[in-house]
Amino acid sequence: MVTKDRGRGGAWAALIACAGLLLSGPAGAKAFKGMEPGKTSKRQVIDKFGAPSREFSKGGKLSDGIRYDGDETIEGTLEANFYFDKHGLLFRIDVTPARELTKAQVIKVYGPGYQEGTARQGLRYVNYPKAGLLIFFEQDADRVKVFLFTEAKTGKGG
């Protein structure tokens, strides 16, 4: 059963949860539980996780998607949103982790090869562009708010 408790667990438990939540391929892009932006279809997501809590389509790039929360929550998350292009190919996943994870824990798992910044909304983030992973932190805390999985960026930089 998934807990929505964001209380302070042991550092090792949170680190293990982080490593288990975010599965990576052999190199490059990160995948979420085997679902990889740019490679996974909508059918594959539904086959893996079952019927979503909600499907949405309102027009625009981030509008065609499915959400898992509430009774359909995916293990290790409070919420997961999968966004698809017009051909039903996954291009982004937004994951709100169920466990409290800190910036230090994220960097320990993914390494130092990141860019840091602040979004217009004031949220701080670390970006691993070569891995297609962007991690936002809560406004007034050093806790992960959401992981964004996208296609990995190739070439120079990042």
Image (cartoon, grey):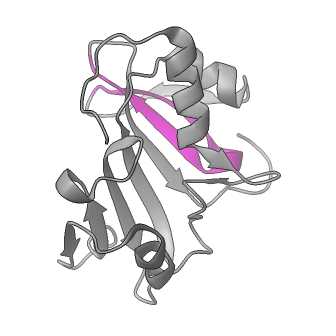
Q: Quadrant of residue 120?
A: top left
Quarter of the C terminus within the rendering: top right
* Residue name at image x 76 percent, y 52 percent: 28
Measured as percent of width and height from the top left, residue 143 is found at 38, 19
Q: Who's the residue at 23% across and 54% down the image? A: 69
Percent x, y of residue 132: 61, 51
Question: Among all residues in the image, which is located at the extreme front?
Answer: 1
Return the x and y of residue 22 as percentages of the image width and height.
Answer: 57, 43
Q: Is residue 138 magenta?
A: yes
Q: State the extent of the magenta-drawn residues as a range.
A: 122-139
Residue 70 among magenta residues: no
Vertical comparison of 152 with 59: above or below: above
Nearest the viewer among 8 and 109 is: 8
Q: Residue at x 29, y 25 (%)?
A: 122
Q: Is residue 4 above or below residue 88?
A: above
Outermost residue toward the bottom in this view: 87
* Tally of marks: 0
Q: Residue at x 26, y 72 (%)?
A: 63
Residue 118: x, y in percent?
40, 26
Is the residue 108 above or below the residue 78 in the image? above
Q: Image check: 80 left or right of 154?
A: left
Q: Is 35 on the left or on the right of 26, as rendered? A: left
> Of residues 117 and 29, which is closer to you in this image?
29
Q: Tell me the quadrant of the picture where the N terminus can be found.
A: top left
Whether residue 32 sits left or right of residue 113 in the image: it is left
